[in-house]
Image (cartoon, rainbow, N blue to C red):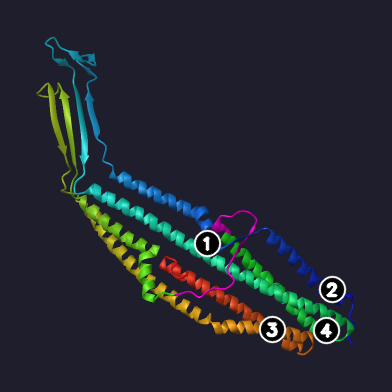
Amino acid sequence: MLNFNASQSRPIWLVLFFIYCISINTSAQQKDTIRFSLPEMEKRFLDSNFLLLAAHYNVDAQKALIEQARLWDNPVLNTDQVIAGDGKFFPYGKNADGSFNGQYYIQVQQLIRTAGKRGKLINMATTNAKLSEWQLADVLRNLRYQLQSDYYTLSQQMNTVALYKGQLTRLNDLLTGMQAQLNAGNIAQKDFLRLQALVIALQQDITEMEKSITDTENDLKTILQIKETVFVAPRQPDNVQLPQIPEQQVLIETAKKSNPYYQLQIAQTLFQEQNLAYQKSLRVPDITLGPNFDRNSNYAPNYVGLGISLPLPILNKNQGNIKSAAFGVKQQQAITGNAETELVNNVSNAYQKLLLTIRQQNEKQQSFYDDYTKMYANILYSYRNKQISLLEFLDFFNDYTDARQRLLLQQLNLQLAKAEINYHTGTDIVK
């Protein structure tokens, strides 16, 4: 018979103290917990995220440049005034015969853009503003996908911790009962220590999972711009609904219309083509017109003339810029083609993964998990009544814990698969 003393009872008190600390920490955490549904998180995200705010300002800035491109060039005033002549300063006035004395020259010049340059600049500014809008949409898409991933991941992590803590509570109850049996010499110490080792392993799993929760929580609060020392928790429905999935080709066509990155590349191609057209228009010289008035420095005392000037496109016909713009069009066309291939492959891959995930989430499996939970309760009861051995109980205990973990992971994979396909299509096509 094994003798049991105070030194042998110390581990159980340490376990109880640890569980007590966890309960205090949990209650404190619940006190400062803010629960959001996913739509509520997305609304807060849209209202408060600084990256989106900066992108909005960029869109507004680019739209202002459209207005700037529509403006005409300002006229230029040229004047030449006499300061001194015939030993006199500012010799203005009239001569004895009534004619004006002194000389001055005034000209107003206006630049006239030819070959539709102004219209082409307006088109480029408009496309550039559209680029900013697609860039904003792409930023929104990426941050929203990260928000959804963190939301579903945090939910799975919290459910896993709840599973571990529930198992830890059951083990602790058994451990308390075994302590009395050990004191009475009815069980071997090796069985008591084996159960104690399982308790410690669960405590370590809880600690590691809570570290992961801390990391996910940090990412989530950064996206939501929450600085307070509160815990942000997801508020999910009780069960995960299986989605209705459109055909793969429908998803691909939707992605080509709605995916911000792909549309951004199409807009970039249009911009490069517009730039090429603008560079070609620069071969045609602009005209500068300028009516002028000259007093007392021409063959007529009061001379009114019209000045016309334009550069002669003999040496510089903008050849280099045109060639560079042409290569820019070809380069962007290649990038857009690659983006299309990548988009189709990403949508197809996400579609296949979602189908495989849904295939696992069926009624038979749900029935299995329900039956397994009932069986677990029976196994726990049987062990307490010494109808099965400790080894049989521990095997079933570990198998049940693994099965519940797989179920939680399976539910997470389903949510992430839906989020991924919506990410690639650029719209919430899968609910």
Earlier in the chain: of badge 1 and badge 3, it is: 1
Could you tell me residue 36's position as x and y percent? 58, 61
Return the residue at label 1.
39
| Residue farthest toward the left in the current orientation of the protein | 299
Q: What's the distance in space between the residues labelled 2 and 4, CA to CA? A: 14 Å
Q: Nearer the viewer, residue 317 or 27?
A: 27
Q: Is residue 361 visible?
A: yes
Q: Nearer the viewer, residue 281 or 317?
A: 281
The residue segment tinted magenta is: 221-244
The amino acid type of the residue labelled 2 equals Arg
Return the residue at label 2.
10
What is the secondary structure assignment of the residue under circle 2? helix
Q: Residues within 10 Å of mark 4 (few under 14, many from 20)?
A: some
In screen coordinates, is 132 left or right of 279?
A: right
Earlier in the chain: of badge 4 and badge 3, it is: 4
What is the secondary structure assignment of the residue under circle 3? helix
**Residue at (82% x, 77% y) in the render:** 176
The amino acid type of the residue labelled 3 equals Tyr
Return the residue at label 4.
189
The amino acid type of the residue labelled 4 equals Gln
Q: What's the distance in space between the residues labelled 4 and 3, CA to CA? A: 25 Å
The quadrant in which residue 40 appears is: bottom right
Q: What's the distance in space between the residues labelled 1 and 3, CA to CA? A: 36 Å
Q: Are marks 2 and 1 in contact (CB under 8 Å)?
A: no
Return the residue at label 3.
376
